[in-house]
Image (spheres, rainbow, N blue to C red):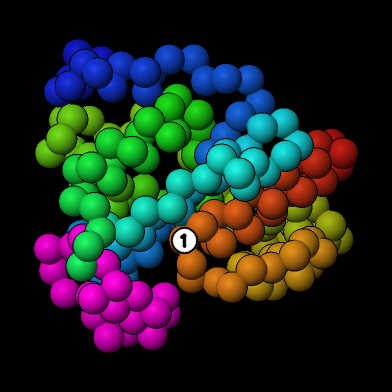
C-alpha cells in the first residue's frame, strides 16, 4: 500500500500502532448516501488502555460543496450557515489523519463514516484508511448472543445506540453530535471489550 500512497508525508499511517490505543470516530453529514453526501463535522477521541481521553479530542466543522438535506438537519441540527466557515475537506482530512495516526478505529456504524472519509481521502492520497476498524454494534451483538440460550441464537437484537448504552449502564450524551457520539462509542467499546474478555 505504501507504493500507492500519493503523499509520503502520511507514511506514519502504516507504522505499528501504539499498544492499547484506539481512536473513536464519528461524522455528521449532508445526508445518508455514502456515495454522494459529504462530511460536515468530525468528532474523534483517543482511547488508551481502559481510559477515554476526552481531553485529547478532535472537533472539526467542514464546509461541504453540496447542500445539507432537510432530513439531515433534523438529525444533527447543523445548518449551512453553521458550517459556512468550516474547514475545507482536505484540511480536515489532514488534521484527522494526524490525530488518528496508525491507531485502529472504533465507532458505531463505522462503515458509513469510513466510506465518507475514504471518498475524501482517495483523491488526496490514492489510498484508503489502512487502519483496522472495530464496530461496537457487532461487539454488542456478539455479547448479547453469548447470553442467550442456544435455542434463541439468531434472535433479533436491538442495536440502537440508546438501547446499547442503557443496557451497558453507561452515561449518555446528546446524540448526533460528532464528539458526543465518538465518546459514547469509546465508552461502549471499553465496556464490551471487558465483558467479552471475561466471558471467554
* x and y percentages locating residue 131 in the rendered image: 43, 31
The quadrant in which residue 30 appears is bottom left
72 part of magenta stretch: yes
Q: Residue at coordinates 51% horizontally, 33% vertically from top-left? A: 104
Q: Quadrant of the C terminus?
A: top right
- Assign a secondary structure to mark 1: helix
Q: Is 64 displayed left or right of 94 in the figure?
A: left
Q: Is residue 126 above or below residue 3?
A: below
Q: Magenta stretch?
A: 63-83
Q: Residue 172: x percent and y percent?
A: 69, 68
Residue in the picture at 29% in, 72% down: 82
Instruction: Give the image location of residue 118, x and y in percent.
Output: 27, 43
Give how far across and how far down residue 129 sits, in percent: 34, 34
- Residue at 61%, 29% (x, y): give it: 21
Q: Is residue 156 visible?
A: no
* Number of numbered discs: 1
Q: Nearer the viewer, residue 165 or 144?
A: 165
Vertical arrangement, residue 136 with respect to residue 121, above or below: below
Q: Is residue 22 visible?
A: yes
Q: Is residue 17 left or right of residue 158?
A: left
Please state if 91 lies on the left or on the right of 160 as rendered. left
Looking at this view, name the residue that lies furthest to the front: 85
The relative height of residue 102 versus residue 119 in the rendered view (above or below) is above
Q: Is residue 98 magenta?
A: no
Q: Quadrant of the N terminus?
A: top left
Q: Quadrant of residue 163?
A: bottom right
Please report the residue visible at 35 percent of the width from the left and 75 percent of the height from the top.
Answer: 78
Other-residue count near label 1 (Cα within 10 Å), few / some / many at <14 / 14–19 / ≥20: many
Give the residue pinned by disc 1.
178
Amino acid at each position: 500500500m505504501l507504493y500507492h500512497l500519493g503523499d509520503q508525508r502520511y507514511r506514519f499511517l502504516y507504522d505499528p500502532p501504539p499498544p492499547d490505543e484506539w481512536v473513536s470516530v464519528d461524522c455528521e453529514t449532508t445526508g445518508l448516501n455514502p456515495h454522494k453526501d459529504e462530511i460536515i463535522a468530525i468528532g474523534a477521541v483517543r482511547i488508551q488502555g481502559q481510559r477515554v481521553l476526552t481531553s485529547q479530542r478532535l472537533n472539526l466543522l467542514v464546509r461541504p460543496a453540496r447542500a445539507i438535506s432537510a432530513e439531515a438537519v433534523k438529525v444533527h441540527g447543523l445548518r449551512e450557515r453553521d458550517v459556512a466557515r468550516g474547514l475545507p475537506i482536505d484540511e480536515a482530512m489532514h488534521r484527522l489523519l494526524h490525530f488518528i495516526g496508525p491507531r485502529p478505529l472504533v465507532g458505531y456504524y463505522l462503515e458509513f463514516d469510513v466510506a465518507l472519509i475514504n471518498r475524501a481521502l482517495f483523491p488526496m492520497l490514492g489510498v484508503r484508511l489502512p487502519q483496522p476498524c472495530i464496530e461496537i454494534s457487532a461487539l454488542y451483538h456478539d455479547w448479547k448472543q453469548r447470553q442467550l440460550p442456544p435455542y434463541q441464537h439468531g434472535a433479533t437484537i436491538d442495536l440502537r445506540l440508546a438501547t446499547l448504552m442503557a443496557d451497558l449502564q453507561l452515561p449518555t450524551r446528546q446524540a448526533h453530535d460528532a464528539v458526543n457520539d465518538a465518546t459514547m462509542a469509546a465508552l461502549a467499546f471499553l465496556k464490551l471489550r471487558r465483558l467479552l474478555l471475561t466471558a471467554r
